[in-house]
Image (spheres, rainbow, N blue to C red):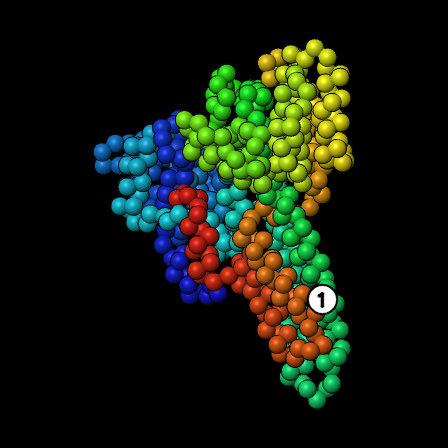
Amino acid sequence: MITEEIKNNMTQTTIVAIATPPGNAGVGILRLSGNNSLSIVNKCFKSQTNLESNPRVAVYGTLSMPSFTDTVIAIFFPNPNSFTGEDVIEIHAHGGSFILQKILDHLISLGATMATAGEFSKRAFLNGKLSLDQAESIIELIHAESESHLNATNKVYQGKLKQKLLDVEKKLVESMAEITAVLDYPEHDIENTAINHIESNLNFVLNEIESLIDTTHEGRIISNGIQVAVLGKPNVGKSSLFNAILNRDRSIVTDIAGTTTDTISESMLYKGMKLVFNDTAGVRGNFVKYEIIISSHGAIEQMGIERTKRVVDDSDIVLAIFDGSTPPTDGDKEILELTRGKNSIFVLNKSDMVEDAAANKLDWFALLQTFNKGNVKIIMASAKTGGNVNSIKEMVYSSVTEQIKRTTTSSDEIIITNNRHLNELTSAYTLLKNVLSNKATTTIDCIAIDIEDALTHIGNITGTRANEAVIDEIFSRFCIGK
């Protein structure tokens, strides 16, 4: 637990760092936070406008250093109405790396201390400006690569997860109070009444936690993207279709069978969702029997095919590519075995070469119906002409999003995208589920231990009970200046 003494020791200095990424740009920003921010900046910043008298106003002036002077804009954010809850000053200077480093060195020479990774956000947490889960969401906001991920993370940053978990903590604390009353006043015979209240509270808590845990499949897709395994035999146009979907030459395409010997991954945005296409090594028909065809590069080919199987196993959807210009063969049936049990789309490529498209499609449709015994997603396409390429992307998107419970762009539901949060929620859920399952045979003091442990797991998410080691580990993931 973070004590007031630890908090005061961590926030007594005035820290400084460059807040913009490394490299040269038109503007670069330095940030200071701490009680001495204003006095340090006033030693070198000169302007006709007084910073202290004009909070949250962009003030133009000059920053004087021993070797040169730069024209800058400074903004003063007085405590407690700042990101960190302390006095904060931002200096917007010319964005050359060397210039910014010179300014940084000068501010340190005037009494500031170089900030550690994530120290600004850590101070915001310690000063009650952010909960721990909100602070973590800053990292995800910065690294979000899709609209769906941004929306899900923004809900956490706005405090919706924190509020739900504070309600959970309140019920658990109430239960602990009931237990304390039973233990302190055994003569009042209130244990049965307390147990009933505790059971009601724990059922509420379990429902809340379970609803969050149930979002984690969707959360993984949102944060990592829909993982698509592009599967097919050599020379069915798999890599050509992969390139056509991405609208760029990402995979090498030749007439030589087995050109792709490793998995090539590339992502794109579609309707606000990140789609990750994984072009796999061409799989020969006898792969399922593990009788790898030996060629001059047989060992490499075998490793590539083994990796293909892992990619298929880990995918959200399989895009199985077949040569639609010919009827299906026994080798194609063996390839189909790799898609068994997987959400799959079957693409009949080379439609531009098909003379009797309708008859050919019926042959393939009959095979796939027999194999899947259900709703078959089958589409004819042409990597060469681009025919139905956009339809493939739509099918990938809809095939996965129709399986997840919420529409991320419009729903107010909180979605768990953070693995640490999932682990803490799962641990708390297991403890409380065991309490209810064993309540008839467990003493009330043992119930108290499990509830207290569950409180710790929930508090490790919000930060209400997180210890210093957990907090340090989380903020070490941040960049310097954030």
Residue placed under numbered mark 1 in the picture = 201
Q: Nearer the viewer, residue 247 or 242?
A: 242
Q: What amino acid type should be assigned to the residue bearing mark 1? A: Asn
Decide if residue 119 is on the left or right side of residue 423. Answer: left
In front here: 113 or 48?
Answer: 113
Residue at x-position 70% and y-position 74%: 439
Give how far across and how far down residue 384 sits, in percent: 59, 14
Q: Foreground residue, 156 or 347?
A: 347
Residue 5 seen in the current view: yes
Image x and y of residue 64, in percent: 29, 35
Identify the residue at the far left of this view: 67
Question: From the viewer's perspective, is 171 left or right of 423?
Answer: right
Which residue: 68% across, 13% down? Answer: 354
Q: Position of residue 207 (x, y in %)?
A: 71, 58
Where does residue 210 sit, x and y in percent of width and height? 68, 56
Between residue 398 and residue 134, name the one nearer to us: 398
SS class, disc 1: helix
Residue at image x 42%, y 33%?
Answer: 299
Taking the image as shown, residue 208 lies to the left or right of residue 64, namely: right
- Residue 397 visible here: no
Residue 31, quarter of the rendered image = top left
Quadrant holding the C terminus: top left
In the image, taking residue 328 as reference, residue 11 lies left or right, namely left
